[in-house]
Image (cartoon, grey):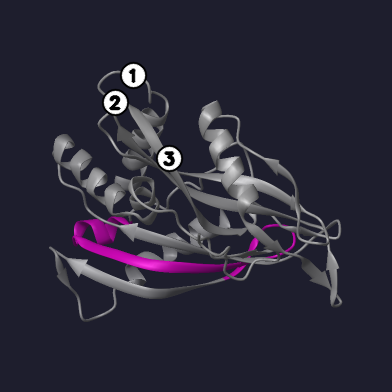
């Protein structure tokens, strides 16, 4: 499946930035960072994943600390809080080294366990046989235990053999997506020492990849180069934007 192959390729590249032969690839990746803020909205602690190279951890931590945060409230009063931020990052090769950029990718609950990544839902067999591809947003509400309690699908588009389908094929994908959500559990955000319910949005793409490994690699590279964070690494920076978390990230003015 494309998602599993893409994740494996990204981790392989991250594991060998300094290796010869790797220096021409754009490396796009995503990581999750715990941020504790006080009642005034100041980040008092940033907990970085240990599986990233030290230089990358330092760069992303500095980027996360440079963002502004709006205090969570309880009964109208500002409160200290803990949130988990998804950071979209990219390393663009330059003269045998890498230029880094990190972009705010949203915040909310964190996936439980050691992995920063939720396992991708499997490609429904009936959709694969029918060569139906799909792209959609899955919006899920999580309770204060980090378990899904409701979900809905938005902005769904369906294709077959590269051509858009006028009739929805959601029924082919919904059962597997709902089952996937109920098998995924999160650590909730914390406000004033207590866990709270939250909302998360997943952009899910089901795409049938070709059989050529070289073609698949180039396809991933094109998608990486087109991403906002990779363009930022090659050019200017990016202002982060948050959507409906307990703690809000405030976009800092550019300059």
Could you say which quadrant of the image residue 69 lies in? bottom right
Which residue lies under the disc numbered 1? 19
- Image: magenta residue range: 124-150
- Is residue 162 visible in this depiction of the protein? yes
Residue occupied by mark 3: 100
Comes first in the chain, label 3 or label 1: 1
Q: Is residue 188 left or right of residue 200?
A: right
User: Of discs 3 and 1, which sits in the foreground?
Assistant: 3
- Quarter in which the N terminus is drawn: top left
The residue beneath circle 2 is 22
Return the residue found at the far front: 255
Is residue 185 visible in the rendered structure shown here? no
Q: In whole angstroms, how far apart are the C-alphas of marks 3 and 2?
A: 15 Å
Kindly report the distance in space between the C-alpha atoms of the residues bearing marks 1 and 2.
6 Å
Q: Secondary structure at mark 3?
A: strand
Of residue 90 and residue 117, the one placed in the foreground of this image is: 90
Q: Is residue 108 magenta?
A: no
Element marked by disc 1: loop
> Left of 136 or right of it: where is 30?
right
Q: Is residue 220 above or below residue 242?
A: above
| Residue at horizontal 19 percent and vertical 75 percent from the top | 165
């Amino acid at each position: 499946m494309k998602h599993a192959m893409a994740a494996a390729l990204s981790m392989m590249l991250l594991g060998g930035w300094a290796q010869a032969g790797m220096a021409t690839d754009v490396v796009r990746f995503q990581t999750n960072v715990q941020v504790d803020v006080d009642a005034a909205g100041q980040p008092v602690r940033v907990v970085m994943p240990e599986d990233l190279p030290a230089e990358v951890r330092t760069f992303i931590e500095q980027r996360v600390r440079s963002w502004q945060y709006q205090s969570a409230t309880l009964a109208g009063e500002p409160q200290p809080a803990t949130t988990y931020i998804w950071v979209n990052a990219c390393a663009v090769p330059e003269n045998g080294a890498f230029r880094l950029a990190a972009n705010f990718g949203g915040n909310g609950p964190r996936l439980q366990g050691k992995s920063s990544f939720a396992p991708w839902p499997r490609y429904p067999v009936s959709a694969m046989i029918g060569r139906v591809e799909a792209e959609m947003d899955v919006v899920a509400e999580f309770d204060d235990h980090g378990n899904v309690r409701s979900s809905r699908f938005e902005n769904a588009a369906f294709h077959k053999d590269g051509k858009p389908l006028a009739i929805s094929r959601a029924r082919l994908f919904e059962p597997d997506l709902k089952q996937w959500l109920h098998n995924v559990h999160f650590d909730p955000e914390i406000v004033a020492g207590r866990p709270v319910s939250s909302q998360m949005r997943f952009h899910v793409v089901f795409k049938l990849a070709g059989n050529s490994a070289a073609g698949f690699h180039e396809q991933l590279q094109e998608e990486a180069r087109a991403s906002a964070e990779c363009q930022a690494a090659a050019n200017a920076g990016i202002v982060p934007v948050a959507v409906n978390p307990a703690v809000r990230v405030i976009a800092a003015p550019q300059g």
